[in-house]
Image (spheres, grey):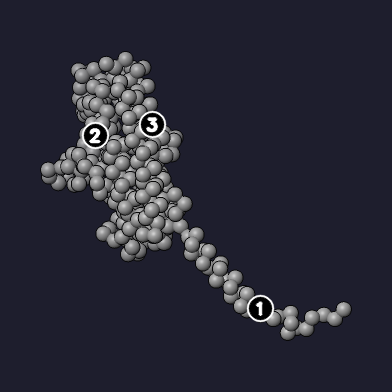
Amino acid sequence: MALPSVSRRLRHPFPFAILAIALSLSTGVASAKLRVVASTPDVADMARQIGGDRVSVVTIANPRQDPHKVPVRPSFATRLHRADALVVQGLGLEHAFIPALIEGARNGNILPGAPGYIDASLYVKPLQVPSSQNRSQGELHPLGNPHFNLDPVQGKRMARAIAEGLERVDPSGADDYREGLERFTTLLDEKIEEWARLAEPLRGVKVVSYHNDLIYLANRYGLLQVGTIEIKPGIQPTPGHLENLLRLMKRENVKIIIREISYDPGVARSLAERTGARVVPLAVMAGGLGPEGYVDSIQANLEALVGAVAESGSP
């Protein structure tokens, strides 16, 4: 049998090749996800919950790190250079690493004030806004205490700001982001009612924490914070401060010491041994106690606190 001529075998090769390339490119554009870099695990999880399949999210801070002391790594500047959006918790929580990373990233789309800079604190009602900027008061946050993520009611406000930011960067996904926000908000509403019942034993319980990061959690669930192991925010304790704190705990009959997991367990353990109090590990970022999601992390924190209160016999 005669073989087909070369001209017949190569008939119309280029139109088909061009069509294949075009289809490949169009499919790639259609399936491309919004590249989101999140400063903390909390805002990362919220972005994933709201954005769904439209977003690809990477997180900078490790859940067991001190959010005030996250190291600046060049690899994150590279990710930020390619990012479509940067989501921060805000109120200066990330002052130790985000400004330097943004500067190194050289990405105008994620500069503060640009469309791709998404500040989750936009609708938060800040507490402990300092009246002065005197550095002798310790590690101050001029805009207020930035640990509002520990209060799930504030979490709803965070989610709203994140959804609006994603929609701003990706208007074609507006319906998806609004649906994602509605799903997440509905879940939070259900859990907030459940958590109010779970946390009822916490109301009126006196506690000491390592860092000044409990104000939103305490306000929501009625804890009474009588002191901190740090002298002032970011200032480590001296022997004299610890002796004063020891006397205060005995006088106030404090049976719960909250030790945020990024801080030295030894100091909290020593205080507990001298006062008979119980040490409760607490996560200030989602995933610190194991569960990775925001909702699961709130649940884990409350269960740890309620369990410790029950075991301590605190009123």
Image x and y of residue 302, in percent: 35, 28
Residue under label 1, please give it: 13
Can I make out residue 117 in this image? yes
- Mark 3 and mark 2 lie on one chain; the one further toward the N terminus is 2
Residue at 48 percent across and 62 percent down: it is: 30
> The N terminus is located in which quarter?
bottom right
Residue under label 2, please give it: 215
Which label sits on residue 299? 3
Q: Is residue 70 left or right of residue 19?
A: left
Residue at 27 percent across and 58 percent down: it is: 112
Residue at 17 percent across and 42 percent down: it is: 129
Image x and y of residue 139, in percent: 22, 43
Select label 1 or label 2 by which is in front: 1
Amino acid identity at mark 2: Ile
Circle 3 residues within 10 Å: few <14, some 14–19, many ≥20: some
Select label 3 or label 2 by which is in front: 3
Whether label 3 touches label 2, CB < 8 Å: no
* Circle 3 SS class: helix
Q: Is residue 305 above or below residue 289?
A: above
Amino acid identity at mark 1: Pro
3D distance between C-alphas at marks 3 and 2? 18 Å
Can I make out residue 104 in this image? no
Residue at 34 percent across and 24 percent down: it is: 198
Amino acid identity at mark 3: Gln
3D distance between C-alphas at marks 1 and 2? 69 Å
* In front of the other: 210 or 45: 45
